[in-house]
């Protein structure tokens, strides 16, 4: 973590579903860290009505003898989305608990603003999804910044050794 003064970073805003508070103007000053960001507000404060006892194995076994053209692709996409939500929520809560236990002064992913440098824009835009009409803000940031490597938060089933291969220390 370091302190920066008037450093240039970029923020990719994927949608405007929060209305006017999403429309930043040149010269606006935005304080980050005092309220929940959109990740927390949308993903963690929304009741998705997911079945906590969802049994993916039973669902797959039920579908295994069906021909592909007999399976509703939207059903599979919904099931995949629910699975991803469970994994993502679990990951984020673990990160938050660990952050508090290690050092509660470290920035919270629930209250931060996700930014990147200019080189990161081409990397992040396609990964974020829902980027048909993103707004990209060029920001001048001052204050505490925590730089992290995306490889540490990937959602996959690879070993940590595999995920961390090639990371600089």
Image: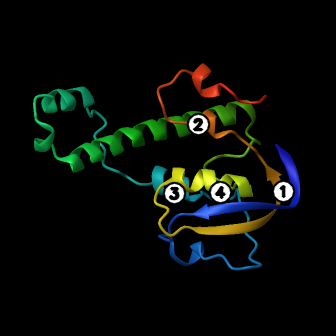
| Residue 99, position as x, y percentages in the image | 68, 36
Closer to the chain start, of discs 3 and 2, is 3
> Label 1 to label 4, Cα distance in Å?
22 Å
Nearest to N terminus: mark 4 or mark 3? 3
Left or right position of 131 against 103: left
Tell whether 163 sits left or right of 75.
right
How far is disc 4 from disc 2 in space, using C-alphas?
18 Å
Q: Pick whichever of labels 3 and 1 is earlier in the sequence.
A: 3
Pick whichever of labels 4 and 2 is earlier in the sequence.
4
Q: Identify the disc placed on residue 121.
A: 4
Nearer mark to the viewer, of 3 and 1? 1
Q: Position of residue 158 (x, y in %)?
A: 51, 24
Which badge, 2 or 1, is on the more N-terminal residue?
1
The mark closer to the camera, 4 or 3, is 4
Q: Which residue bears the numbered disc 1?
A: 143
- Mark 4 → mark 3, Cα distance in angstroms: 24 Å
Q: How is the image coloured?
A: rainbow
Mark 3 or mark 2, which is nearer to you? 2
| Residue under pointer 3 | 41
Q: Which residue is mark 2?
A: 153
Image-quadrant location for residue 11: bottom right
Residue 68 visible in the snapshot: yes
The answer to whether residue 113 shows anywhere in this view is no
């Amino acid at each position: 973590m370091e302190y920066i003064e008037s450093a240039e970073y970029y923020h990719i805003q994927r949608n405007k579903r929060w209305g006017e508070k999403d429309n930043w103007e040149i010269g606006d000053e935005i304080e980050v860290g005092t309220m929940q960001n959109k990740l927390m507000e949308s993903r963690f404060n929304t009741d998705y009505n997911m079945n906590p006892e969802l049994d993916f194995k039973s669902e797959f076994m039920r579908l295994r003898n069906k021909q592909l053209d007999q399976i509703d692709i939207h059903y599979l996409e919904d099931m995949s989305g629910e699975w991803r939500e469970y994994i993502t929520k679990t990951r984020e809560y673990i990160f938050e608990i660990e952050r508090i236990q290690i050092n509660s002064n470290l920035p919270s992913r629930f209250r931060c603003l996700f930014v990147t440098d200019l080189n990161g824009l081409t990397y992040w835009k396609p990964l974020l999804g829902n980027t048909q009409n993103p707004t990209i803000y060029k920001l001048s940031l001052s204050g505490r910044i925590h730089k992290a490597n995306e490889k540490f938060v990937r959602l996959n089933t690879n070993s940590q050794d595999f995920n961390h291969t090639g990371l600089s220390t």
